[in-house]
Image: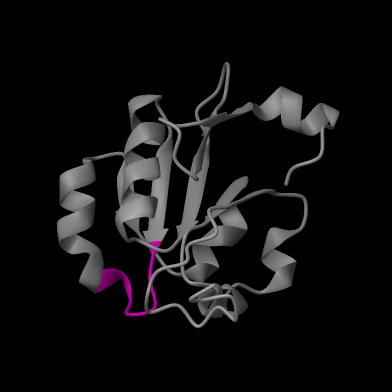
Amino acid sequence: MLERSPLNFQRGLIKLISGRTFFFVCCANMAEKIFFLGAGMIASGVAGAAIKRGHHVVLSNSRGPATLEKVIKNLGPNASAGTVEDAKNCKIIVLAAPFAAYASLPAAYTENKILIGTASLAPSSTCPFRGH
């Protein structure tokens, strides 16, 4: 959960989309580059909402950028495929992958960033809470 700080209010508002358990960032006066760790249904849905609000998104997955061609094409010109290295250049990071994938994002890349977790509990997830 994000704490209420001047940075959070300056950069945008966190809003709930249609009652589901994921979030998007709607920044008031500036387009941001948003990095997504994950490229599945949640990530692509939230990325689409961010693109409609003028943001550029970078999606990544464990199989590499070449495997995201179809997703990126569907999202349009404000979307690109990347790797965890791209998180360094984004002010906002959305964690939209199974918990096991979070370890692929070095902690140093998250310093001074806005982090949004979607708590992606996909059936293939290695989350210890799966099935509860």
Residue drawn at (72%, 47%) of the image = 1
- Quarter holding residue 52: top left
On the image, the x and y values in percent for residue 13 come to 63, 26
- Determine if residue 90 is in view: no
Residue drawn at (76%, 58%) of the image = 111
| Magenta span contains residue 46 | no
| 113 over 83 or under it: above or below | above
Camera-side residue of 20 and 50: 20
Q: How many marks?
A: 0
- Quarter holding residue 124: bottom left
Residue drawn at (44%, 40%) of the image = 20
On the image, the x and y values in percent for residue 87 come to 56, 60
- Quarter holding residue 81: bottom left
Direction from residue 63 to residue 88 in the image, left or right: right
Camera-side residue of 118 and 123: 123
On the image, the x and y values in percent for residue 31 come to 50, 28
Give the magenta-colored segment's residue range.
Answer: 60-66
Kindly give the residue lying farthest to the front in the view shown.
Answer: 132
Camera-side residue of 14 and 81: 14
* Image quadrant containing the C terminus: bottom right
| 79 over 83 or under it: above or below | above
| 16 over 41 or under it: above or below | above
Camera-side residue of 17 and 93: 17
Kindly give the residue lying farthest to the right in the view shown.
Answer: 5
